[in-house]
Amino acid sequence: MAKKTVSQPVRGSTSGRPIMVLLDILGQRWTLRILWELRDAPLSFRALRQRCDQVSPTVLNDRLKTLRELDLVQREDGTGYRLSQAGEELESTLLALNHWAEKHWAGR
């Protein structure tokens, strides 16, 4: 399975710039939710699907495939899926963004 590189255009992005690729991937439905649910511990496919409001298995498989190709998620035998080191680094950035949003937009 070939890994996607940041120079490859993705869904509407012709620049291939790393930030545009990242934002495009994160903007796909369910991607952020999957990363969010994996932030604390590995989850089986079934548990991840339940936490993602019963997202369709096809969509979940597609998103996990993309996240694995980008080395944000890894599959572990016996436990399911977990964030990779790169995924954990991204998660800390997303948590900082979450804190910012709560500070500036809470209660709006």
Image (spheres, grey):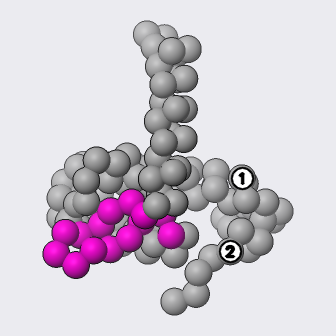
Residue at horizontal 51 percent and vertical 15 percent from the top: 103
Helix, strand or loop at label 2? It is: loop
- List the residue tagged with mark 1: 19
Helix, strand or loop at label 1? It is: helix
Q: Nearer the viewer, residue 89 or 11?
A: 89
Q: Is residue 8 visible?
A: yes
Residue at horizontal 30 percent and vertical 66 percent from the top: 81
Disc 2 residue type? Thr
Tell me the tag on residue 5: 2
Q: Where's residue 23, x and y in %?
A: 64, 51
Q: Nearer the viewer, residue 16 or 38?
A: 38
**20 relative to 77 in the view: left or right:** right
Q: Is residue 54 visible?
A: no
Disc 1 residue type? Ile
Q: Residue furthest bottom?
A: 1
**61 relative to 94 in the view: left or right:** left
Tell me the tag on residue 93: none
In space, the residues marked 1 and 2 are separated at their CA atoms by 12 Å
Q: Nearer the viewer, residue 37 or 50?
A: 37
Q: Nearer the viewer, residue 80 or 48?
A: 80
Q: Where's residue 46, x and y in %?
A: 17, 64
Residue at horizontal 22 percent and vertical 78 percent from the top: 77
Residue at horizontal 55 percent and vertical 14 percent from the top: 104
Magenta stretch in the rendered image: 71-84
**70 relative to 62 in the view: left or right:** right
